[in-house]
Amino acid sequence: MLIHARCAPGHSWTNPAERVMSVLNLALQNCSLERVRMSEEAEKEFQKCDSMAQLREMAAKKSEVKTQWQESIEPVQSTIRNRFLRLKLKDERFQAVDPMTYEDIDVIKRHLRDLFPTLDTDKLQKVHTSKVPEYADWMSRHCRQSHYIFQIKKCEDADCCIPGEDMPWLPDPMLDETGDHYYKYDVAKTMETSEAYRPSLKLNKQTKQTRPSVSKRQTMNDSTHGDELQTEGTPQHDIQNPGNSQDKSLYTTQNARAIVTCVE
């Protein structure tokens, strides 16, 4: 069984699990990065591309350019890797995982072609893979996916998987009867759970319910002077934000300008 989890995407600075980013930034202090310049021909080819997708497409057509790009970027990768490896968190050293090689990717694609003959391995985005019947069937029997967690384990069909211990899916967090605490893992793993109590899902619902309508916001803006939004006689820049506010809109650029007082 494999369980792959990610930290909360979007507005990550409000999520405690993401605050390790400030530790990673320590490694990049006083560090200047510059890739090695490629040949003039290769540089001209890369300047024509406006996205990573276009870069990959061009590199796939011209192997000599791909090789030059790898040689150009390798010193930068090595510098960042070595600086991250010098970090510690609670006396534990950081680890750095090597990126997948093109050979590794080719091996995975070969396995995919064996398992799912009609799957286009050059289009592995969900919008394409979900239309392949045998792939969708395999996913339904072996995988469980939620907003933050992707799980995969053996099925009970002996013709498909080698029999082994049947392990429970990692449960979604569920609030107990009090509504103030989440069930402990030992209890939650025996339940049929859902994402109904996912913190960010609850937050989005609360924000939609409490945020004024467009017409109301427009009326409020029309009745104010300058850039200060008056709320019951209090200028918005006087509103104190403790740093753990649940309203994500406070962190957008325009609202931050209204709240933060800049001094020299």
Image (tube, helix red, strand yellow):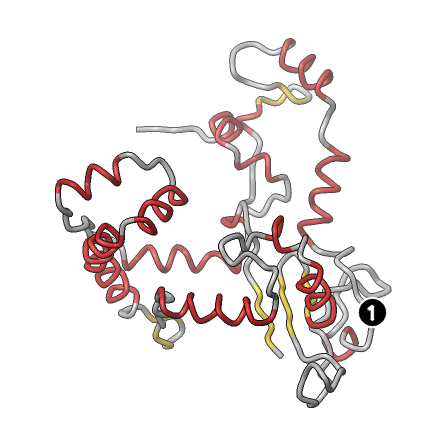
Query: What is the number of callouts on the image?
Result: 1
Residue found at x 56% / y 9%: 225
Q: Quadrant of the rendered structure where residue 83 is?
A: bottom left
> Which residue reaches farthest front?
117
- Residue pointed to by mark 1: 192
On the picture, is 70 further left or further right than 226?
left
Front residue (pair 76, 261): 76
Front residue (pair 201, 211): 201
Amino acid type of the residue tagged 1 in the rendering? Glu
On the picture, is 95 further left or further right than 132?
left
The quarter of the image holding the N terminus is bottom right
Q: Position of residue 113 (x, y in %)?
A: 54, 67
The quarter of the image holding the C terminus is top left
162 to 2, vertically: above or below: below
On the picture, is 104 further left or further right than 48?
right
Residue found at x 65% / y 56%: 147
SS at mark 1 in the image: loop
Q: Position of residue 133 (x, y in %)?
A: 71, 60
Residue found at x 70% / y 20%: 214
Residue found at x 76% / y 76%: 189
Q: Residues within 10 Å of mark 1 (few under 14, many from 20)?
A: few
Q: Position of residue 51 (x, y in %)?
A: 38, 39
Q: Position of residue 120 (x, y in %)?
A: 55, 56
Q: Quadrant of the rendered structure where residue 156 is?
A: bottom right
